[in-house]
Amino acid sequence: MLLTGATINDKGSLVVSFKDKSVQAPISAEDDLLNSTAGVKASSGETNIIIWPVQVESNGQPREAKDIANDLRAVRDQLEHLLLGYVTSDRAALKPYEGLDTTNGADFAASLSKQPVIDKIYKNLTTQFIAKIAEIKDLREVQTFRLLLLRRSVANHYGAFRKNFITDNPFWESEQIPAEASKVKFTTWELNKKLNDGTPVAKATVADALPTGAVSAANDILGIR
């Protein structure tokens, strides 16, 4: 995989884009037309992963400060993990608190329940990430990586980055590492929860599978949005 770019979409969410280098785009408009006429769907090999903004409420109820902080930490760790594929840790480091007054620790901790503060931290992390990957465009165009994605939830089959323990269980690894030495693989826990399965599930099936008030299995590690 190549990391091709990152943008903020119209919903304010970070979208990180990847492309499978082995998949070739159609060589011409005429060729694409012939494929379409023959019923052949050409694959672009593109994958877009959304990193959602962190919310201070869930289902109209305030969330615990520690859960909000964990979600912010996960965003930082995921983005720095991608950057560390190309640069050293000092260059990959993101500064989440730029523009925020953190001199009074107690007051700052209390501010983590305020959506504007959380939005500012999220914006710091994502805009800095976009700027940093722009600086390494030449590296991104030639260095290929293995990318592992988890199923987002029982109801949502779209892929998401692993959120926890990514130092020991990376989801992003240079293909220069021999396949037999690769650390990019699903954990036993993820396999047991079927987070490696990208099969769409009908809404009715999901409703039947979950008891009233239950959350999806993936929320155990991905967090509740």
Image (cartoon, rainbow, N blue to C red):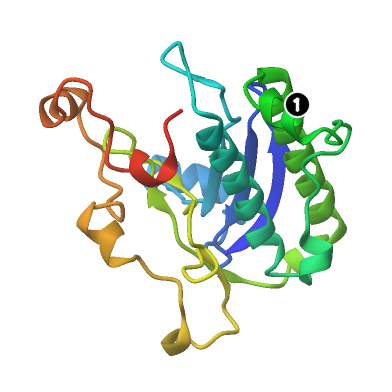
Residue name at image x 14 percent, y 26 percent? 211
SS for callout 1? helix
Amino acid tagged 1: Asp
- Outermost residue to the top: 60
- Neighbourhood count class around disc 1 (C-alpha, 10 Å): few under 14, some 14–19, many 20 upward: few
Residue name at image x 63 percent, y 62 percent? 2
138 above or below 72?
below
Front residue of 44 and 122 = 122
Report which quarter residue 58 is drawn in.
Answer: top left
Q: Position of residue 10 (x, y in %)?
A: 67, 22
The answer to whether any part of residue 39 appears in the image is: no
| Count of numbered labels shown in the rendering | 1
Residue name at image x 63 percent, y 30 percent? 13
> Is 74 left, or right, of 14 in this rendering?
left
Front residue of 46 and 164 = 164
117 above or below 139?
above
The answer to whether any part of residue 165 appears in the image is: yes
Q: Position of residue 66 (x, y in %)?
A: 53, 36
- Outermost residue to the left: 208
Report which quarter residue 4 is drawn in.
Answer: bottom right
Front residue of 54 and 37 = 54
| Residue under label 1 | 107
- Report the quarter where the N terminus lies: bottom right
Q: Position of residue 141 (x, y in %)?
A: 74, 65
Residue name at image x 70 percent, y 44 percent? 6
Q: Position of residue 129 (x, y in %)?
A: 76, 48
